[in-house]
Image (cartoon, helix red, strand yellow):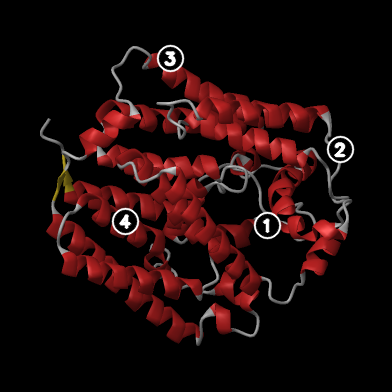
């Protein structure tokens, strides 16, 4: 084990032990980001795959600048609000119970979204002739499936499921409506499975856990263990469909791993974590031009319909210098691709400041609006080693709809 890996895993252990103290907020931005990135760098520097290379000093410099400026953004906001009165997690849970929930509006919002989901999904299935799961080439069909505009309502699956979870958290009685919502949950959750898109399930699970954590005491060790086991098996089952043609042996071989095939089951998880930074290192070393906002503001270009036109006109390739079929990059890749060092310093600093500002707002107001927005941004932290959801139109659409619906449904507390 390298010194870098040893140091990073030590940081992970330190953060873990700090989090098990009573009254500690385990989802605070610095803790989540610090743990995720210490673990990611530690895993990557093990260099278990021969596809990995030793990084030059410049790559390490870019990586450290990105992480430090993100933490600096968090720190600046923390210092500026140091003396503000903030609620503890337990106080937030108590105060959130006094939020005024307009049950009929929440139920109506869910019904409308489920209807839009079913209609949009039906139109897409008719247009493409089948679900990706049943296509002769499911991996290709999964990527190509979706009609512009309409697919936003299909991709709103996490939004629908999260609202249903909130209904059960905040609304008492109404047994018949809850039975209907359980049916809606099963339909949406089950039908989306046929699209073979795991990312949306991860979005739902992570944001729901965060919302449940700040609004109730349901997130105890027993319940967390049960949910984790269920999610693990669902995730593994979906993985089997996604890679039905690829045996475990094949994944092990293409990963060109240094450890014995006895541990081939770890090949996929290891490569999904490690190759993000390896791909970024390739980009840092080989990139010879910048795209000046195309990837940072991807969601805007997708919304206006300019995304593909610009890509074709300028000959842009979205995923460059990837290795061995692994083609994902960490959260600051768009900033570096667009603006180089200037992008990662300003971009990561502003993102860190934004996320901590929302976190402080949540701690200061204990409002459901702040909690739901922070849950979405907390997911950005959790998945930051793998991608940047804030550049995706689907994710921006989900956040926007959540805020609109919560403004429509919830009212400030009376105390």
Residue 301 showing in the rendered view: no
Q: Earlier in the sequence, mark 1 or mark 2?
A: 2
Judge by depth and name the residue closer to the eye, 393 or 251.
251
Q: Position of residue 34 (x, y in %)?
A: 58, 30
Task: Please tell me which of labels 4 and 1 falls first in the chain.
Answer: 4
Indicate the quadrant containing the C terminus: top left, top right, bottom left or bottom right: top left
What SS does tag 4 mark?
Answer: helix
Q: Which mark is residue 79?
A: 3
* Alpha carbon separation for disc pair 3 and 2: 37 Å
In the image, what residue occupies the spot 51% across and 29% down?
Answer: 19
Mark 3 and mark 2 residues within 8 Å of each other at the beta carbon: no
Quarter of the image that includes the N terminus:
top right
Q: Is residue 274 above or below residue 260?
A: above
Q: Earlier in the sequence, mark 3 or mark 4?
A: 3
CA distance for labels 1 and 2: 25 Å
In this rendering, the answer to whether 25 lies above or below 205 is: above
Along the polypeptide, which appears first: circle 3 or circle 1?
3
Question: What residue is disc 1 on?
Answer: 317
Q: Tag 3, which secondary structure?
A: helix
Instruction: Residue under label 4, please give it.
Output: 165
**How far across and down, in percent of the image, does residue 290 sit?**
66, 42
User: Image check: 59 left or right of 395?
Assistant: right
Name the element at disc 2: loop
Foreground mark, 3 or 1?
3
Residue in view at x 47 percent, y 55 percent: 227
Mark 4 residue crowding within 10 angstroms, few (<14) / some (14–19) / many (20+) = some
Q: Would you say the residues marked 3 and 1 are in contact, meaning their CB atoms lie under 8 Å apart?
A: no
Residue under numbered circle 2 = 54
Q: Is residue 267 above or below residue 294?
A: below
Of marks 1 and 2, the one in the foreground:
2
């Amino acid at each position: 084990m390298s010194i870098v890996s040893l140091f990073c895993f030590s940081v992970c252990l330190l953060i873990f032990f700090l989090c098990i103290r009573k009254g500690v907020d385990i989802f605070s931005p610095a803790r989540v980001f610090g743990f995720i990135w210490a673990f990611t760098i530690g895993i990557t520097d093990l260099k278990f795959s021969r596809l990995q290379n030793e990084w030059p000093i410049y790559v390490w410099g870019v990586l450290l600048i990105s992480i430090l400026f993100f933490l600096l953004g968090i720190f600046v906001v923390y210092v500026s609000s140091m003396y503000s009165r903030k609620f503890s997690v337990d106080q937030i849970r108590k105060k959130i119970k006094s939020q005024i929930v307009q049950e009929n509006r929440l139920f109506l919002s869910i019904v409308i979204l489920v209807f839009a989901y079913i209609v949009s999904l039906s139109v897409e299935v008719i247009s493409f002739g089948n679900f990706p799961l049943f296509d002769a080439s499911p991996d290709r069909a999964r990527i190509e499936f979706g009609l512009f505009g309409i697919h936003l309502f299909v991709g709103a699956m996490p939004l629908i499921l999260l609202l249903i979870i909130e209904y059960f958290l905040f609304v008492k009685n109404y047994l018949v409506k809850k039975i209907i919502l359980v049916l809606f949950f099963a339909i949406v959750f089950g039908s989306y499975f046929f699209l073979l898109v795991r990312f949306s399930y991860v979005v739902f699970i992570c944001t729901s856990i965060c919302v449940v954590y700040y609004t109730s005491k349901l997130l105890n060790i027993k319940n967390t263990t049960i949910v984790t086991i269920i999610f693990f098996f669902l995730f593994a089952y979906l993985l089997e469909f996604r890679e039905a043609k690829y045996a475990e042996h094949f994944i092990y071989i293409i990963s060109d791993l240094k450890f014995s095939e006895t541990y081939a089951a770890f090949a996929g998880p290891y490569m999904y974590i490690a190759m993000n930074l390896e791909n970024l290192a390739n980009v840092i070393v080989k990139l010879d031009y910048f795209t000046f906002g195309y990837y940072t503001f991807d969601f805007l270009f997708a919304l206006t319909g300019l995304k593909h036109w610009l890509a074709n006109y300028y000959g842009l390739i979205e995923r460059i210098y990837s290795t061995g079929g692994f083609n994902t990059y960490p959260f600051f890749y768009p900033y570096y691709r667009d603006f180089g060092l200037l992008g990662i310093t300003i971009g990561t600093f502003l993102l860190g400041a934004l996320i901590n500002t929302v976190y402080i707002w949540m701690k200061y107001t204990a409002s459901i609006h702040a909690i739901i927005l922070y849950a979405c941004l907390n997911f950005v932290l959790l998945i930051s080693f793998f991608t940047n959801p804030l550049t995706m139109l689907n994710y921006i659409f989900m956040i926007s709809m959540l805020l609109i619906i919560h403004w429509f449904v919830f009212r400030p507390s009376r105390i």
